[in-house]
Structure formats: C-alpha cells, structure tokens
Amino acid sequence: MKVTTGDYRNIVIFTGAGMSAESGVPTYRGRGGIWHQYNWEEYACQDAFDRDPEKVLKFHELRRKLILSCQPHAGHSAIAELEKHHPGVVVVTQNIDGMHQRSGSKRVIELHGNIWRLRCPKHGVLEDIGEAYRRHRCEHCKSWLRPDVTWFGDMLNHDVVDEATAVIGSSNLFISVGTSGVVWPAAGYPQIAKNNGAYCIEINPEPNEMSHLYDLTIREPAGSALPSLFSMASTS
Ligand code: APR
C-alpha cells in the first residue's frame, strides 16, 4: 500500500508508544507494558511525587537509561525523510522519549511533554539529557524538580493541545501510528481529522475502539509499514 503524499497539503502523523516499540521502548498497555509492571499511582502522578519525589525521579531515570540504549527505527527515519520533502508534515506525539527528534524530525508537537526536561514550580523548564538527572532540586530555590511529562491527573498544556488540535483539524491526511486510542484528548483526534475530511490511516498490529473511524487500517508494525507507505511522487 502506497500513499501519494504529494496529493495532500497538510499531513499529520499522530504517534503513540507503539511507534517506539520496535526501538525497544516498552509500551504502556500492551504485552510487557509499563503499567503492567509498575503502578502508575506510585510513579506517574503528582500525589506520588509529593509523597516520594526521589522514588518518582529514580523511576524516570530508569526509563531514561533504557531509552538511551534504544535507537530510532526505519519508521522514525521514514517520517523524518518525508518531512524533509514535504513542508506540510507535522508529528503530534504522545511519546515522551524524544525518538522523533533523534531521528531528525523537526516539527514535533509533544502532547505529553518530554522525559529529557525537568520543571521547577518557580523557575520553569530546563533541559536535562542523560541517564541520571543532573540535579533533583532547583539550584535557585531548592524546590524538587519534576520530570516535564504529563502524568495521570495532570492538565495538559493548553497551548500544546490547541496547537495539536489546530493542525489535526486542518489536516488532509491523518496517519495514526501505535496508539491504543484510550487516553483523551488524543483519543478524539481521529474524529477531528475526519470532520475536516482528512483521509485517515491507522498503523497498528491490533485494532482498538477508534479503528472504525479510519479509511484504511494497516495491521503491521510501524517499522515495516511506514517505510513502504510513503510515495513522494507529487501530483503532476
Ligand atoms: N507498531 C505499531 N503499533 C504497535 C507496535 C508496533 N511495533 N507495537 C505495539 N503497538 C500498538 C499496540 O497495539 C497498542 O495499541 O501500540 C499501542 C500502544 O498502546 P499504549 O501502550 O496504550 O500507548 P499509548 O496509546 O501511546 O498510550 C497513551 O497513555 O499512559 C499514558 O501518557 C501515556 O502517552 C501515553 C498514553
């Protein structure tokens, strides 16, 4: 199956944890998923952080260590390559691993933040790349620094959600890759794309609640489906 990307002005590639699965980054709900091994109520919510910030920071450092040992795969590269040749491509990702950026994608909207950033309640966001965080407390005010990611119960960043909703609402081609479609507002994005008349493609070995909304479902892994999907040929 090929899609002629030159036929579409605005292309959104919407990704979830399944996009990084073949790189070795575990998903959340599938086989070997993170939430089967860890209780998010102890590691991925503000209450857990308030109770034991060190425990939460160490959990995120474990994930950083694993992600650093992983590499982007051919599916990430196919998206980055497409973006080079098509000015209307934007990635909207739920992933916090930074894999799209590592593979060369520039236009990436991170709905759920990024594990390579920390946030001080008073002094804002700072980048921190590496296994262990350089510090666990703000050097200015000594507040505990929390990972700049969206935890259960957090409000999403309104500006980011507005930007994501705007690009999806004006997309002509919407490709969802590796998401179970259970977390909102992301779960509502296929419908928003469809309402704008976008051609909607789902790449996921498993069907889910939102699969019926798609014009085309590709039951293959991202790493093999994406490189063979894009035909750059533009319309004559
Ligand atoms: N290629 C494509 N899809 C895959 C692959 C693969 N190689 N491997 C697994 N998948 C699919 C699974 O079938 C599943 O539908 O990826 C999806 C992963 O679903 P989740 O683990 O629920 O991940 P996601 O949809 O991104 O979760 C959304 O939930 O916990 C929160 O903040 C977290 O961003 C996350 C959000």
Image: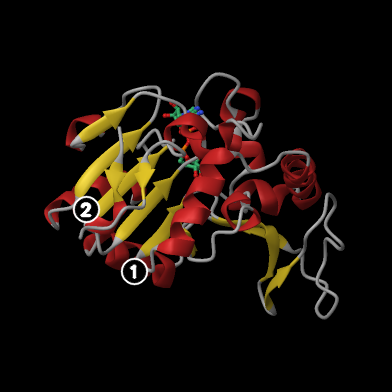
Q: Residue at x 77, y 63 (%)?
A: 128
Task: Name which quarter of the figure residue 220 lies in.
Answer: top left
Answer few, some or many: residues within 10 Å of disc 1's Cα (few below 14, many 20 plus, some between 14 and 19).
few
User: Looking at the figure, which quarter contains the C terminus?
Assistant: bottom left
Picture layout, residue 16 above or below residue 119: above
- The numbered disc on residue 235 is none
Residue 10, how many percent across, how many down? 28, 63
Q: Earlier in the sequence, mark 1 or mark 2?
A: 1
Picture quadrant where residue 118 is located: bottom right
Question: Which numbered circle lies on residue 193?
Answer: 2
Q: Identify whether 222 is placed above or below 79.
A: above
- What's under tag 2, amino acid-wise? Ala
**Which residue is at the front of the view, 141 or 125?**
125
- Spot occupied by residue 83 in the image (x, y as percentages of width and height): 45, 60
| Element under disc 2 | helix
Q: Residue furthest top?
A: 31
Please give the label number shown on residue 162: 1
Give me the residue at 23% from left, 62% from top: 169
Query: Amino acid under label 1?
Result: Asp
Q: Residues within 10 Å of mark 2 (few under 14, many from 20)?
A: many
The label nearer to you, 1 versus 2, is 2
